[in-house]
Image (spheres, rainbow, N blue to C red):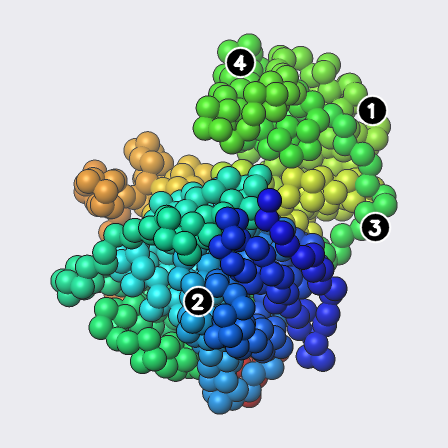
């Protein structure tokens, strides 16, 4: 057995508010008399819900420990050093909470240099160094692991990532140099650029090992003990560590960086400087030595820390991490009723997705209903099929699969709702249909049962008006795909009571959704803003501006080009939303005749995919309704016009009380429509480009909230 001493960290907070991650050292006798390994455990004294991070004091503490280990290694007291984390967490990178207080480039440069100095000291230890990646590792945590000579990783690790470009930054403590020189430029740019640009995708432990980031993939049950045994074999020479040689061919590196650049320009139009700067650093890593590479990363970090894009990214991160967990305007959670059974009216794809979500996350019986047996069987069958797929993929065990399958049943009768605590309707977006559904449901359920509509645009107040108990009707607007999109808009009708609303918020929390309170108004927050965005974009195209020019103007604003988004949403749904908004608000919401034509022709979108490329549908191109007097705008004119109408709509929504604050609008667009973190949602972008002041007369956010404080 391996002998270790036990050390426990206590939570400690530095004067600046930093939760300090300590580097706790214990001596481990290697198996077979192999000598002493100094095992460093990173621990901030909290459980896994407060991950290890590196602030100034934590970095200083790590540097001090490494210096002591150097002395011990030189004295022959230890033969190796290993670094691991507390349970479930290795380290998730720099503590960025203090960045808003950084007021000069010199301060930013000090932050960059401190991290490099500490990690370089690990690299320069005179004995073999190991990273035992036992849990989530991101940013500086990954870079610390890369600074070690060897790495093991647990197969149970759920998240390995360098997400800095997602926020508008670069991996600046060695990542842009060490990773490409370990796994090659293409694999490195997958982690540094491609994954962050694609909704901040994370690698599992096994995927990271397959990519070459780790030398050994070990099972989680005895991960630490097996890592120590593996390290002992490496130190003794019994286990040689072989890695694929990284090519130095310039054309190979150029091809990888060019592909990454194309992706960044598609996603951001070059408006997020961090991603392009990261590509430059990776390219330079082919020939640079460590000192030069680290110095270049220092300069990049110093520049980017003083950019508004990073501050907007941190603002967005704070919204998702903090505001999302404390929804503004939510009633006292003590008023919420317990949900022990859920009814779902409808058995289409959206209803089926909801049934699976409720069963998986709430672990309660779910009854689906529809007009006939065929529809019910198809909906329930889809849910059961998804559960079977998860079983086959090894995501869940047999017992769990059987339990989930048993929870979801179907019927053509609503009698099964009699003992339900919550009934959700997901039927056709027609008010008369919704009213009929609720009248039928109310005849069956108890007076306390909460009735929730998944409508994306219709009035909750009108929907409930004819019921005996309109106070228990609430809107639960989910976004498609339900399992993926984090946002849940919760809509309070004019007569919705606090108990029903509190139950809706508690349910959203149980479903692990980001919940936002929205006033009952047409299309709520996300669809109203997307409707204004898509409407104005379509108006500009209908007036004569070529689609490529218009799309270039708004690149980097929404997560994808507008007409690609149109294909994802579906032209019929987009047309219904635009017509609903036009009826409610008039001509500022444009209903495109070309969109109507698209729906009439039964088209699924403006583009077709041919050999992985988006090309204009030739039939739509031929049927395009051209204006009698074309007006063609340039890129700058299109951008200003689109952003101006968005600023106008945001201001109106805040004035009407549709959203509680600008922060809720930004949070809604980030979690419900995929707007980029480095933009900060929408209001920081409007402030940053001067549109807010031009259209509204003032900024939406105070200076410094999502920008560099002057």
Q: Name the foreground residue: 300 vs 333.
A: 300
Task: State whether residue 626 is above or below residue 10.
Answer: above
Residue beneath the point at 33% across and 50% down: 240
Badge 2 is on which residue? Answer: 127
Badge 3 is on which residue? Answer: 332
Q: Name the foreground residue: 42 vs 470.
A: 42
Residue 482 is situated, as x and y percent measured from the top left of the image, at 54, 38
Task: State whether residue 374 is above or below residue 695.
Answer: above
Q: Earlier in the sequence, mark 1 or mark 4?
A: 4
Rounded to the nearest whole Å, what is the CA distance between mark 1 and mark 4? 27 Å
Task: State whether residue 419 is above or below residue 81.
Answer: above
Badge 1 is on which residue? Answer: 446
**For numbered disc 2, what is the local secondary structure?**
loop
Rounded to the nearest whole Å, what is the CA distance between mark 1 and mark 2? 71 Å
Q: Name the foreground residue: 377 vs 322.
A: 322
Q: Earlier in the sequence, mark 3 or mark 2?
A: 2
Badge 4 is on which residue? Answer: 377
Mark 1 or 2, closer to the camera:
2
Q: Outermost residue, front direction?
A: 33
Is residue 615 shown to the viewer in this render?
yes
Rounded to the nearest whole Å, what is the CA distance between mark 4 and mark 3? 39 Å
């Amino acid at each position: 057995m391996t002998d270790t001493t036990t050390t426990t960290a206590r939570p400690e907070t530095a004067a600046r508010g930093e939760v300090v991650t300590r580097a706790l050292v214990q001596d481990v006798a290697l198996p077979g008399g192999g000598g002493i390994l100094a095992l460093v455990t990173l621990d901030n004294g909290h459980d896994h819900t407060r991950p290890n991070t590196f602030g100034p004091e934590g970095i200083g503490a790590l540097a001090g420990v490494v210096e002591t280990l150097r002395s011990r290694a030189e004295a022959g007291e230890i033969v190796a050093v290993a670094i691991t984390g507390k349970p479930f967490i290795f380290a998730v990178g720099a503590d960025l909470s203090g960045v808003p207080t950084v007021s000069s480039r010199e301060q930013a440069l000090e932050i960059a240099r401190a991290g490099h100095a500490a990690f370089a000291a690990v690299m320069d230890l005179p004995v073999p160094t190991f990273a035992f990646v036992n849990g989530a590792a991101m940013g500086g945590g990954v870079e610390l692991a890369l600074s070690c000579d060897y790495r093991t990783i647990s197969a149970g690790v759920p998240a390995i990532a360098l997400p800095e470009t997602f926020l508008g930054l670069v991996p600046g403590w060695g990542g842009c140099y060490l990773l490409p020189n370990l796994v090659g430029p293409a694999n490195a740019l997958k982690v540094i650029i491609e994954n962050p640009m694609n909704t901040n995708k994370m690698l599992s432990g096994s995927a990271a090992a397959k990519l070459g980031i780790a030398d050994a993939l070990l099972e989680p049950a005895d991960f630490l003990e097996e890592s120590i045994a593996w390290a002992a074999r490496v130190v003794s020479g019994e286990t040689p560590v072989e890695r694929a040689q990284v090519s130095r061919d310039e054309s190979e590196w150029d091809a990888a960086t060019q592909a990454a650049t194309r992706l960044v320009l598609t996603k951001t139009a070059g408006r997020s400087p961090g991603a392009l700067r990261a590509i430059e650093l990776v390219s330079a890593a082919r020939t640079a030595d460590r000192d030069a590479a680290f110095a270049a990363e220092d300069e990049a970090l110093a520049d980017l820390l003083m950019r508004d894009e990073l501050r907007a990214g941190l603002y967005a991160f704070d919204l998702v991490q903090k505001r999302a967990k404390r929804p503004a305007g939510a009633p006292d959670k003590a008023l919420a009723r317990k949900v022990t059974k859920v009814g779902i009216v409808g058995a289409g794809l959206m209803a089926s997705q909801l049934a699976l979500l409720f069963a998986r996350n709430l672990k309660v019986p779910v009854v689906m209903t529809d007009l006939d047996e065929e529809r019910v069987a198809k909906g329930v069958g889809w849910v059961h099929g998804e559960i079977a797929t998860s079983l086959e993929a090894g995501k869940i065990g047999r017992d769990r699969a059987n339990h989930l399958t048993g929870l979801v049943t179907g019927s053509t009768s609503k009698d099964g709702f009699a003992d339900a605590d919550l009934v959700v309707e997901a039927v056709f977006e027609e008010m008369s249909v919704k009213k009929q559904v609720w009248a039928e449901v109310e005849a069956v359920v108890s007076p306390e049962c909460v009735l929730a509509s998944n409508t994306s645009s219709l009035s909750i107040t009108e929907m409930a008006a004819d019921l005996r108990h309109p106070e228990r009707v609430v809107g639960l607007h989910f976004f498609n795909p339900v399992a993926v999109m984090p946002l849940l808009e919760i809509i309070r009708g004019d007569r919705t009571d606090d108990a029903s609303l509190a139950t809706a918020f508690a349910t959203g929390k149980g479903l692990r959704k980001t919940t936002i309170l929205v006033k009952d108004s047409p299309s709520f927050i996300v669809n109203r803003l997307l409707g204004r965005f898509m409407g104005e974009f379509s108006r500009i195209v209908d007036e004569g501006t070529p689609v490529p020019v218009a799309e270039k103007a708004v690149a980097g604003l929404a997560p994808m080009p507008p007409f690609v988004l149109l294909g994802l949403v579906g032209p019929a749904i987009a047309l219904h939303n635009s017509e609903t908004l036009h009826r409610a608000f008039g001509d500022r919401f444009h209903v495109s005749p070309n969109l109507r034509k698209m729906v009439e022709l039964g088209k699924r979108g403006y583009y077709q995919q041919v050999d992985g490329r988006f090309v204009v549908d030739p039939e739509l191109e031929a049927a395009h309704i051209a204006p009698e007097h074309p007006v063609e705008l340039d890129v700058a004119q299109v951008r200003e016009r689109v952003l101006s109408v968005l600023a106008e709509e945001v201001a109106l929504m805040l004035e009407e009380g549709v959203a509680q604050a600008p922060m809720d609008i930004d949070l809604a667009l980030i979690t419900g429509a995929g707007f980029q973190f480095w933009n900060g949602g929408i209001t920081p972008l409007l402030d940053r480009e001067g549109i807010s002041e031009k259209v509204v007369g003032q900024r939406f956010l105070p200076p410094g909230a999502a920008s560099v404080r002057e």
